[in-house]
Amino acid sequence: MDRKLYEMQAQLCKTLSNPKRLEILDILKAEGEITVNALADQLEIPKANTSQHLAVLRQAGVVTTRRDGINVFYSLRSDRISEACALTRQILVERLEDQMAMMKNP
């Protein structure tokens, strides 16, 4: 069981290892639900690229979809993914602050 969880965790980390996907997660957290077109506009990348990133996130179980007519709306499957990303970001902010402090006081 533990080995399977480690494999799943590694796969999730691999899915999240792309800066655009992390940006998508931030937008989904803020918007709640958004279409591919609106997301592509915010990301300033082509719709096809946005769709590819969303497909990876969907396959990993990170996002979910809802169809309304011709529009497909994407949202986070769980708020916990945002919490995990925020925690890792805070760790990195602290690391950068430490590095900057060391540069000021060698």
Image (spheres, helix red, strand yellow):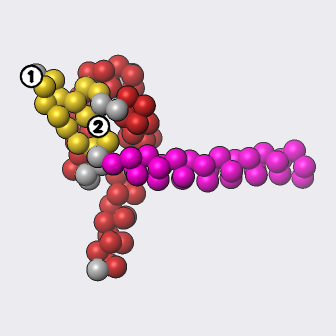
Q: Is residue 96 magenta?
A: yes
The amino acid sitting under disc 1 is: Gly
| Residue 98 in the image, given as x and y percentages of width and height | 76, 52
Q: How many marks?
A: 2
Q: Residue furthest left?
A: 69
Quarter where residue 5 is shown: bottom left
In front: 5, or 105?
5
Q: Which residues are magenta?
A: 78-106
Q: Residue at x 82, y 48 (%)?
A: 101
Check disc 1 and report the residue beneath it: 69
Residue 67 to residue 82: above or below? above
Residues at circles 1 and 2 in contact by the CB criterion of under 8 Å: no
Badge 1: residue crowd in 10 Å (few <14, some 14–19, many ≥20)? few
| x and y, in percent, of residue 55 in the image | 22, 42
SS under mark 2? strand
Q: Position of residue 97 (x, y in %)?
A: 74, 47
Name the residue located 75 percent from the left edge and 50 percent from the top edge.
Answer: 99
Furthest-right residue in view?
Answer: 105
Q: Position of residue 70 (x, y in %)?
A: 10, 22
Circle 2 sits on which residue?
A: 75
Q: Residue at x 38, y 28 (%)?
A: 31
Q: Residues within 10 Å of mark 2 (few under 14, many from 20)?
A: many
Question: Label for residue 99?
Answer: none
Horizontal placement of 41 versus 61: left or right? Answer: right
The magenta stretch spans residue 82: yes
Q: Is residue 81 visible?
A: yes
Residue type for callout 2: Ser
Q: Is residue 49 visible?
A: no
Q: CA distance from mark 1 to mark 2?
A: 17 Å
Q: Residue at x 35, y 57 (%)?
A: 12
